[in-house]
Amino acid sequence: MLVIAHRGASSERPENTLAAFERAIELGVEWIEFDVHADAGGRLVVTHDKPVSNRAYPMLEEALELMRGRAGAMVELKSPVRYRQHAVVARTVRLLGPDDAIVSFQRPALEEARALRPGVRTVQHVGFGTSIRAAREAWAAGFAESRATGRGLAAARRLGLVPLVYTVNEPARMRALDTLGAGGIFTDRPDLALRLFPVAPPR
């Protein structure tokens, strides 16, 4: 079971901050998910909501540099079509390392990423109008926790997809999803998840 720190160790540190990412790395996660928008000037900034001018945000480059060689980054592009004039997908793909992945609800953004960089890991969130079959070219399919069923997870696996579930914070539900066949979970509580699914030491 992959343990993916949702916006970093967001139960312990402010979400989508370098402090949250550093804490997740300290805990030993293999993957950290975070959100990226383009701001008014086209900078790629780490934030879940649309950026506002009077706040300071980490830059995508800063987040990736912090994680490089320490944890894989799952970069979720928020509304990439809205920022088409800033070439958000192309610029993000150029920055990703070999252990990173790009995540989106928007299938065209992931198709663009794969066209620009064949072999890049992509995570297509499904449901809410996007079928599991529509994700078949991706590396993984993301399921909302409330909609994750054994049938859906099995369908993803049959298509060769890693079934991931977001956002799971209760240990009992983590165990249940493991039994149902989830390949990984996004969680605000990587500390709890790693107690249930410790990362295997490198050989």
Image (cartoon, rainbow, N blue to C red):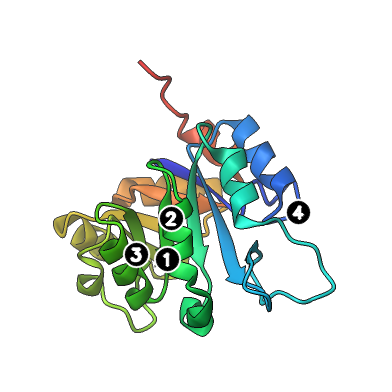
2 vs 3, front mark: 2
Outermost residue to the top: 203
What distance separates the C-alpha of mark 4 from that of mark 3? 29 Å
Q: Residue type at mark 3: give it.
A: Ala
Q: Is residue 149 left or right of residue 67?
A: left
Residue at left offset 49%, top offset 35%: 196
* Element carrying mark 3: helix
Front in this rendered view, residue 148 or 51: 51
Q: Position of residue 177 (x, y in %)?
A: 38, 51
Front in this rendered view, residue 63 or 144: 63
Nearer-N-terminus badge (1/4): 4
Tag 4 residue? 14
Which quadrant is the N terminus positioned in?
top left
* Element carrying mark 1: helix
4 vs 3, front mark: 3
Nearer-N-terminus badge (2/3): 2
Tag 2 residue? 94
Tag 3 residue? 113
What distance separates the C-alpha of mark 4 from that of mark 2? 27 Å
Q: Residue type at mark 1: give it.
A: Ala
1 vs 4, front mark: 1
